[in-house]
Image (cartoon, helix red, strand yellow):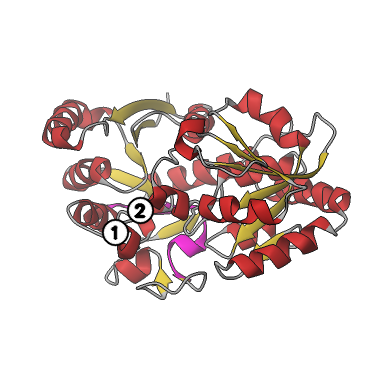
Amino acid sequence: MIKPIKILYIYPGTKSTFVDKDLRLLAEKFRVSEYKFNTQNKKLLPLYFFQQAFFLVRNIFKHDLYIIMFGGYWSFLPVVLAKFFNKKSIIINGGTDCVSFPSIGYGSLQKSPIAWFTKKSFLNASHIVTLHSSLMFQNYKYMDLEYKSQGLQFHIPNLKTPSTTIYNGYDANFWKATQKKVPKSFITVSIGLGEARRRAVKGIDLVLEIAPRFPDCQFIIVGTDPSELHDAPKNVILLTKKTPIELVPIYSEATFYLQLSMSEGFPNSLCEAMLCECVPIVSDVASMPFIVSDTGFVLKKKDIGLLKSLISDALSSDTNALGQKARKRISENFTETLRQEKLLNLVANILKD
């Protein structure tokens, strides 16, 4: 009888929908357990480390492979212990763990101690799954900041850990247009917008600045408490965080999806909105121009004048044709089936070595 492969999947904080998805895809072939690393209170990090160490030492021989979502505090002990006990480990990078923007205090690689733990994790892992090649290295031109390049290979020059690109995958049968489009409507999804830094990173500052210049358009921001943006322009509608089922009709009604972030990985909301036939308008950052391809519009620099011209062009475009093209782009290239196939093959190959 063939012994089943056992995987421990480790993730920080609240379990996200994409963690749930990976667990489901992996569980179809392997025996998968999970461990959540608490990130609620940084002052309690020593306690969280102790709890994780205790769990890992007790269970180190019960698993063949450790998969960790994102590099950070939570990935350090699993990869170091796996290496010590001759086990395999994979880190799936996400975006924040691959960049450093010191001027705005963003990115896991911009200051210690988390930068140290993140770097050591990637250096000691058996393998890195990267959502897009830009998370390994990219020339950064969207803004004039400290670093002209970003990515793990830039910030960790001695990184020799092998990597494989595996894109996120989406269910086109779930994410599909169910409502009639509202003309001149724009939507974006982001949480935690009480801080100015967060608004800048996610490009919400641009949305708030551009909205008054298009008074006949509607701009919807999903995922925020209205109290966080109490001075938002009149044509900006604020909606609280929604479940995936609640998001489908909201995406379906919007003509355009805005993702004007300073930094991203492989944004799920963008892809979900495109499946619901939203025409994408994105910043020239990381994977986003690749995701969008010729189905939408790309803002080359963070500049309100350029954004105004881009939105004017978008409003005069054939939005029906572009929306259908956007859906086709995601449904043919970024599926759950493709992600599952590549994840399963990678696990099998790593455990062969």
10 Å crowding of disc 2: few (<14), some (14-19), many (20+): many
| Element carrying mark 2 | helix
On the question of residue 205 being in view, the answer is: yes
Q: Which residue is mark 2?
A: 97
The residue at 76%/35% (across/down) is: 252
| Front-lying residue, 134 or 128 | 134
10 Å crowding of disc 1: few (<14), some (14-19), many (20+): many
Q: Are marks 2 and 1 in contact (CB under 8 Å)?
A: yes
User: Is 51 placed left or right of 93 in the picture?
Assistant: left
The part of the chain drawn in magenta is: 125-138
Residue 162: where, in percent of width, then height?
38, 61
Which three-letter amino acid code belongs to the residue tagged 1? Leu
Which three-letter amino acid code belongs to the residue tagged 2? Asp
**The disc label shown at residue 109, or none:** 1
In three-dimensional space, the C-alpha distance between marks 2 and 1, rounded to whole angstroms, equals 6 Å
Q: Quadrant of residue 155?
A: bottom left
Residue 224: where, in percent of width, then height?
50, 34
Residue 176: where, in percent of width, then height?
76, 34
Say if 327 sits above or below 312 in the image.
Answer: above
User: Is 341 placed left or right of 20 in the picture?
Assistant: right
Residue 326 in the magenta stretch? The answer is no
Residue 121: where, in percent of width, then height?
25, 52
Residue 130 in the magenta stretch? The answer is yes
